[in-house]
Image (tube, grey):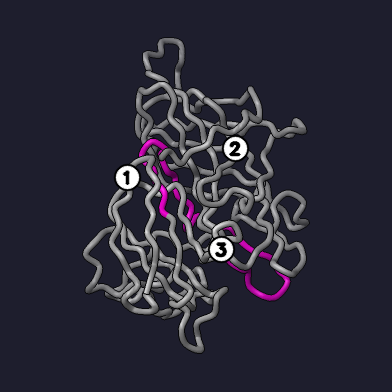
Amino acid sequence: MSIFKTLPVLAVATLLSACGSDSSNDSTQYAKVSFSVSDAPVDTMSEVMVAFDKIELQHENGNRYIIEVDEDDDGYGYQGIDLLDYQGKDSALIVTDEEIPVGQYKSMILHILSDESASYSWVVESGGGKENLGVPSSKLKLGGFDVSTQAVQSFTLEFDLRQALVERGGSGKGYHLKPNGVKIVDNDAASSLWGSVDLNLYDGDLCLINDGFVYLYQNHGLWGKQLSDNADSEYLPDGYVAPYSSAPVVWNDETNQLEYGFGFIPAGEYTAAFTCNAADDHPETFDNIQIANPEEQREEVILYQTKETRFDFKI
């Protein structure tokens, strides 16, 4: 089953510029690429609006390439996107069929419009008010990716907001968006994982329905390892394995059951683990949350390219 949706083209013109290159006798091969954004949801927010302005690419040949994002429906030269509208397998297109040189790109920098007035990027807390969403230097520096000679390559920038969204120091000062938890995923090599969670796994005084989460760890053979909650590497204790991502367990009115889901995950071997009490997982610090809880609720899964895999947590 293919997990990817074809979205409407939001604009027809983008700008690509190279710094330090000479195109007068250019034998470079080019390919077309598209970039979309998607979200692994955060449970404490009802809105996370991010204003995407430009994408800056650093090629292995030393050149920098600046790509303007597609215009929005109103003709603005940036894309204001509420990431919570594009969860799981849904995504929003921000760059359409842009032609760039093939090869390895060492880094990507997302240029974000943000200011203290929260007029471009902001968050709305569940049951709360609008808060500023700041981005240090208005840039998110991400990792690298490869562009081949195939006709069109599509990439998704997957925002794991439980890792990337952090509260700024002091009260009433809004939030910061960090590059932690933002991943570049090649759609041709991506997969998804979803399933249900047995209600009977919520057992004990510390297990509340709204506190259930599933954590996903890269690789198999982690039975002898301690599975960590979300934390910066500097806070991760020795012997613990950091999660690749995490997803809340939510009630689905259509299926009448508790469910979780991960979209745009690179294919490979993973370990999935359920815990019934992870609502207080701080994105930066190690919180010593028991994963899995119940302790036997972890499972090795294999995710295949462009395929959807189901695994249900049961008693």
Q: Do the numbered discs 3 and 2 sit on residues whose CB atoms are within 8 Å?
A: no
- In the image, is residue 33 above or below residue 81? above
Judge by depth and name the residue closer to the eye, 37 or 236.
37
Residue kind at label 2, given as amino acid type:
Lys
Q: Name the residue under label 2.
A: 54
Left or right, 8 with reference to 32: right
Front label number (2 vs 1) = 1
- In the image, is residue 46 above or below residue 239? above
Q: Which residue is drawn at 55% across and 25% down?
A: 16
Q: Distance between the residues labelled 3 and 1?
A: 28 Å
Q: How far apart are marks 2 and 1 (CA)?
A: 32 Å
Question: Which sits earlier in the primary sequence, circle 3 or circle 2?
Answer: 2
Q: Residue at x 63, y 23 (%)?
A: 13
Q: Toward which corner of the image does residue 135 lie, by quadrant? A: bottom right
Q: Which residue is drawn at 34% across and 41% down?
A: 305
Judge by depth and name the residue closer to the eye, 230 or 172.
230
Front label number (3 vs 1) = 3
Q: Name the residue under label 1.
A: 304
Measuring from the top left, give residue 275's x and y in whole percent.
43, 74
- The part of the chain drawn in magenta is 166-193
Q: Name the residue under label 3.
A: 256
Q: Toward which corner of the image does residue 240 lie, by quadrant? A: bottom left
- Label 2 residue SS: strand
Measuring from the top left, give residue 204's x and y in whole percent.
47, 87
Q: Do the numbered discs 3 and 1 sit on residues whose CB atoms are within 8 Å?
A: no
Check disc 3: other Cα within 10 Å, few if <14, some if 14-19, many if 20+.
Answer: few
